[in-house]
Image (cartoon, coloured by chain):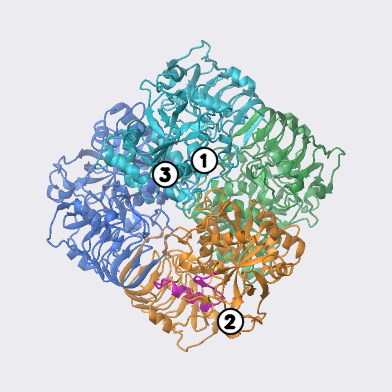
Chain colours: A green, B cyan, C orange, D blue
Amino acid sequence: MSLSPSFNLKIRLPSNCYKPASNLNTAFPKILSITNSQQYECPTFLYPPANQSVAAIVFGDGSHSQLYPLTKRRAEGALPISGNYRLIDAVISNCINSSITKIYALTQFNSTSLNSHLSRAYAGARLGKDGFVEVIAAYQSPEDHDWFQGTADAIRRCLWVLEEYPVMEFLVLPGYHLYKMDYQKLIEAHRNSKADITVSVLSSSRDEDLGFGIFKLNAQSQVIDYRENPMMDPLKSTSVKNSVKFNDDAHHNFPSMGICVVNKNIMRKLLMEHFPLANDLRSEVIPGAISLGMKICAHQFDGFWEDMRSIGAYYRANMESTRKTKNAYSFYDKDSPVYTLPRNLPPTLITDALITDSVIGNGCILSKCMIKGTVVGMRTIIGEGVVIEDSVIMGSDTYQTNNVQNGAGEEKDVCIPVGIGEGSHIRKAIIDKNARIGRNVMIINRDNVQDGNNEKNGFIISGGIVVILRSAVIPGGSII
Amino acid sequence: MSLSPSFNLKIRLPSNCYKPASNLNTAFPKILSITNSQQYECPTFLYPPANQSVAAIVFGDGSHSQLYPLTKRRAEGALPISGNYRLIDAVISNCINSSITKIYALTQFNSTSLNSHLSRAYAGARLGKDGFVEVIAAYQSPEDHDWFQGTADAIRRCLWVLEEYPVMEFLVLPGYHLYKMDYQKLIEAHRNSKADITVSVLSSSRDEDLGFGIFKLNAQSQVIDYRENPMMDPLKSTSVKNSVKFNDDAHHNFPSMGICVVNKNIMRKLLMEHFPLANDLRSEVIPGAISLGMKICAHQFDGFWEDMRSIGAYYRANMESTRKTKNAYSFYDKDSPVYTLPRNLPPTLITDALITDSVIGNGCILSKCMIKGTVVGMRTIIGEGVVIEDSVIMGSDTYQTNNVQNGAGEEKDVCIPVGIGEGSHIRKAIIDKNARIGRNVMIINRDNVQDGNNEKNGFIISGGIVVILRSAVIPGGSII
Amino acid sequence: MSLSPSFNLKIRLPSNCYKPASNLNTAFPKILSITNSQQYECPTFLYPPANQSVAAIVFGDGSHSQLYPLTKRRAEGALPISGNYRLIDAVISNCINSSITKIYALTQFNSTSLNSHLSRAYAGARLGKDGFVEVIAAYQSPEDHDWFQGTADAIRRCLWVLEEYPVMEFLVLPGYHLYKMDYQKLIEAHRNSKADITVSVLSSSRDEDLGFGIFKLNAQSQVIDYRENPMMDPLKSTSVKNSVKFNDDAHHNFPSMGICVVNKNIMRKLLMEHFPLANDLRSEVIPGAISLGMKICAHQFDGFWEDMRSIGAYYRANMESTRKTKNAYSFYDKDSPVYTLPRNLPPTLITDALITDSVIGNGCILSKCMIKGTVVGMRTIIGEGVVIEDSVIMGSDTYQTNNVQNGAGEEKDVCIPVGIGEGSHIRKAIIDKNARIGRNVMIINRDNVQDGNNEKNGFIISGGIVVILRSAVIPGGSII
Amino acid sequence: MSLSPSFNLKIRLPSNCYKPASNLNTAFPKILSITNSQQYECPTFLYPPANQSVAAIVFGDGSHSQLYPLTKRRAEGALPISGNYRLIDAVISNCINSSITKIYALTQFNSTSLNSHLSRAYAGARLGKDGFVEVIAAYQSPEDHDWFQGTADAIRRCLWVLEEYPVMEFLVLPGYHLYKMDYQKLIEAHRNSKADITVSVLSSSRDEDLGFGIFKLNAQSQVIDYRENPMMDPLKSTSVKNSVKFNDDAHHNFPSMGICVVNKNIMRKLLMEHFPLANDLRSEVIPGAISLGMKICAHQFDGFWEDMRSIGAYYRANMESTRKTKNAYSFYDKDSPVYTLPRNLPPTLITDALITDSVIGNGCILSKCMIKGTVVGMRTIIGEGVVIEDSVIMGSDTYQTNNVQNGAGEEKDVCIPVGIGEGSHIRKAIIDKNARIGRNVMIINRDNVQDGNNEKNGFIISGGIVVILRSAVIPGGSII
């Protein structure tokens, strides 16, 4: 079943969500261009193999916080996505499917969530001999008592760990984007071109800044300049997209994906010798490397790629996962499976439900209800007569027992169980984990608010989407 | 929501499926009687604790084969149940929830399926320090080249392994029944009564043989006699239920559940000294122990218990799991969770489905369809326009790729994908793993056959239930 | 074999290393007193059981740094001890052996080492159902961008995680002491006395401050006062031991072990209501609780306990493990095993060695050599003619391959392999991981230096003990 | 350090233990010949990669029993070797190091030992995504109630499992030989030659039958004939080595190693169509394939290879591991590590020992003793004054506690602890697991017996080597 036409009518695809272009600008050298569907069809095998020669450095969090309150207790990489997953699973799975099994995850913002997920989901298994996902939370040491000051600072301070295995290249990856890429193709291109650094760019030659700056390439796909929009606001990216234009041909400008391959010794030289005070890789070190005349190549990526810089983008990525579409991100592809924490849950028990365009996690109990265009996460309990439309229900961490008080301050509402109470109606909302929605609650953004904060009552509204906070209690009869 | 009244109308509960009796025979001493709901409410803590003093011996297969063809490639304990589980998970979970973590699983019939499941699901984890599930498949040794000749023979030949840890009691368990029991209560009763052996019996004082014989008890719940029906046919148990009646008061006769606690040194003496040639524990050793005058007590069990001796019983147990009932077996109980192999599957994607009284496993893809009273197992792919009623769909082991040939002999049908083809209609059927149902297939037992074998075309009919074989291919347009 | 008499002659036992007292002050109520050997002999079983009702909060690092350079890259809890272990394994093993399986490890100083060890050694296994060791590294959140400001601040900021499971008590534990304690006895005493808080104290009624202050008890073992020595210097604790004396009877003063049991709701009230600005549990919150009139009891501990506040103490604890002594910490006790990361190493290959009073880890290769009073860690390679006395050789993380450069800066010395070169002589030294000692090196503290720093040449001297730094290279022929 | 000259004097290398030949017969085509040291130096990368295209079928036991009593409770593959390993680890490690991660282990003789080891050592980890070691113990099914009748019968009956994954080739491996081979080189040769079957042969062109027959090759390394010695007795192989000579040039005859690569569809055709009644692969199916004119190539192996067909050979292989030799099997090679069950043992504590040419496992406690040319397995306790020479001490499964009775029948000897009692002297002996050697025992084969059975007293003698049985008790003062 193909992408439903009505989808395009209802939700205009935002500029930062790229679908594979059907007709690429043919003036541009296509040799490096790959499409999403090709990613794992004609596999690449590197020599020496990726699992022995490449180490991935994944950043679990970004520095911006447009995702609050979803990130109140979580790193961006720990955001639940499509019911069963955490966002960082997409990137870790790309690594595993690309045979890259030495993975360092660097975090400092709300790192607990990410540490817990990664160590349980990937510790001691799956990655084959010598493989690992090692979480490096920001730490104090005798030499340095500060937090990581940026990506470059973080890598510099961890070099002693990162250099433990004799790899050839570091692959630097943001851990909070949704896409599938065979990184082996990127590394193969890097090795073939004998570059010092290879960056990954979105192939559509638009000059929008996706938060990682814009590279200007020459005809040989070599980077000759870098710009970024200092006023870049991820929530309003469409309106500023022209502001970082280079003077020359637009089709030589490509938005960076924040991904780069750096030779191990080049990384050390850049961080320790050339730019020992630089904090940020993207805005300081890579422009510096350009100015030093290093060989920096670009590799175009032409598949589905979804950024998560705002609640709107996060909402759309979840919505996307509720539809069978050929070009979108697939969780069902045997050749490039998405890994996560294996769980031991019963199947979902459904008494009487009409369900359309939705994904339903394991362990739910659904009474008579209607669900449409919705992600229903693990262990969600849905009462009779509930109607849910175009929403993200994150689910619950455990099944509730009757006589337990989950922390102080909730005793008074303990009569409202975790889940969605009878007769409630939810539309275009995100219900965070362990929320307790009472009976006959209406979460429909009645007043059509675009943005508003009502945290003390357990919700905020962002871009017209109502977000019910983690463990919030919405009393019966409430109308939001 | 309570047991739907229509359920009782449609399917008459068979005699071997016991529900908690609401009014017990009050003439009988009730002190030992427990109900299902009490099982984990008032927990028992043994001293010395069960995880250090008890070893469970679980038998993964029985000797009868009324479950063929479901057991063509599987031990009975490896039968899929309620979508996500294998039957033996119920007993292993009982052990874990009863803090019994030294578990030996003895098998010889189609043991591969069970070995693979148990070693992946329980090896090296979950059972705490010193805990294990050790699979002992029948083996040849310099001393004995035969298969296990029965439960007693199997235990005798494995005593050298079973005695490795200094436990006090062995708990012998059939591994293919569905029930929840806190075995600690059974062991506590055993220790309190200072018995040599304690057997578990169903508390309703009926004199039906459930395949494990009938015990006659005195007023002190002590076993004074044992009988079994030599002609016992599990498929016709209702008609023969009177044949093993003892002469005296019927309410002193209790059906055995095949479960017993035996002191470690008593086990050794019975098997090595008193009855060194006995093959069967139930019919030879325990009656022998009675005749020797050993102290054998009975412990009554009054909860839900489902036997799986026939395809009908297997079908009913699955049907039971599709309904929210207070007294039935629950997979959703936080205090007595059911464990199984943790899996890493995407949530189920539903395009447009009306689902009633069903359980849906993870990783399914459901197009526009109607599902009623059905267990839908993992990774089931259901095409458009499909209608499924009162059936068990076991699901698939992997997602199919297009160009794979699953073994020889299937090349010709490779165009029919695994799953249920568009427009098909299935009613009162069991669809085994990896079956390929073509388009517009009708599996409705059109001719209302009670029993019939059509293995060469991929199905049999048993008790009016159509069973599609594992990996069978049903061509498009077929009517069964 | 008992404690060798010469041991007492050579190394005077420091004041912070307690051995079980043979004649306890009988004036003191002995009811709470336990000895080390009794710890696991008469086991305690709590109701509700510890694994469901207690959560341990382990601190992986202290705030002092007398262990530098051993802690240059490690938290104190990650210090290698006795060849195969990390220091924190002792406390985690105490928890497991006490059936406490919900364990939170809070860290911020060099947390990488500890995270990596704990997540690999304890993730997803051994701890039974619902058990876990969850590492919480200091993190930034929208509410708080600072590091943990102390133990109280750390617990306060993590309360939302720590309260996830409905436990009754928190057990607060420093993670860098060496001792065996059945915490169930401590919790049993706490429950029996109906205290708000129970602290653990060393039973010998000396008034030395071990870094956690001194409690003054009344005759009912209830805490009535707390003092700490503001000038407490762990390196010179013997000289200041009188400075914190209370005015009254000395035998009512007991040194705190830094361990306390706090009721869950008391913890919340103390941290959130009474002392919302307190940073430190020991010096602010517990004295505050005393002043509030809460019931605080003390539980005496009378076993072996070794602090690790200085390089000298660390050295002595390792030395202790090389001797068969009845009263010391045992790694060989079946009833209270010490857990760690399971490893897959070959046995140690010995060509010709005379070894006395030493422990030898797995995977070593020993040529003709003499080893006396020494801990030889995993994968240590020892050349011909080597003599090692009274030293700690930590060993190596991997076997070296010939053509690998372990990070920059070492290329020049790559000809010196990891291990101890031929003909070298080492006495009273600590050789940190992956060090490369050339041929005919003398590490004997020739000039009898007490304290000196020579980091640029790869070593320091502390208390007369030479410490060779991690990955240091000592050229052939050097004399230290 | 090279192979000590005295070694060759003391123990004549038997004919079935091949060392790399220094001067190969140059008349023979050398193109396929590889030496042991090259195995992992110039790695091979297959396309498609081995982990996706090859399944290994490992046989855990052979059909002969010259290893009794070592195999009384164990399959041959489960024999302890070099202290920390089981014999089958060598072959499984070869697979892992060759990137072959789909491994089926077929067993039926004493399979419990092997199942337990493999499922704990390799289940759920290390093998990367989609990797597994699946143990298939002989089983009964509705179709077949017999044991496996041979290797061909076993594969035929398990084809439904073995064909589950779409591999290209099956690699058939005996699981009880000690050698290192990069199987990828064998498979590469197989694919390059477009053979139906490729067998592995020892490169020295001798015509001895090693138990797997002799292949005659033509100049293109293609198999043109097969012979085996019907009277082949592994214990006397030297005396019969000429009996299977082909008539022609001896240097075209090569002994089979029992290893072969068979295309998946060829395997099915041979077993199901051409030779549906054949039981044995080696003696029936492969000769049959030759007669059918299939293309069967041979691949020469020129490294260390040790057979274990007799107690003498088993003894020698262990002795070999106690010496640092360049050409022998190495457990210390970083590039081809040997995997096994990871363990959590303390380091070995040595009071005063002179140790030469020995390997010492973890967790031992050695009092004043002399050990020479000996394998000392895990948890061995050695008393004061013990002298051990040229022996294999397998060690113990657990540390003994004082008050435990390990099974019936041992109570009387419970005063003799597990381990080697004070003052005992052991020479040229194999001490099986958990044996209890009393004080002042002499195991020196006093009467110079070559072969004798004294099982009732806990030992046998084979080829002059004394074998103390598993869990045997040798009373103090005994002289053997």
Identify the residue under disc 1: B182
Which amino acid, mark 2? Ser
The mark lying in front, picked from 3 and 2, is 3
D252 falls in the magenta region: no
Q: Quadrant of residue D11?
A: bottom left
Q: Chain of mark 2?
A: C
The answer to which of A455 and A403 lies nearer the viewer is A403
Identify the residue under disc 2: C237
Q: Quadrant of residue A336?
A: top right
Q: Is residue A446 above or below residue A249?
A: above
Q: Are labels 2 and 1 on one chain?
A: no
Residue D14, how many percent across, how many down? 19, 55
The answer to which of B372 and A42 lies nearer the viewer is B372
Identify the residue under disc 3: B194
Residue in the image at 73% along x and 70% along y: C291
The span shown in magenta is C301-326
Query: Is A77 placed left or right of D340 in the picture?
Result: right
Q: Are the residues tagged 3 and 2 within 8 Å (C-beta)?
A: no
Residue D147, how many percent across, how many down? 29, 34
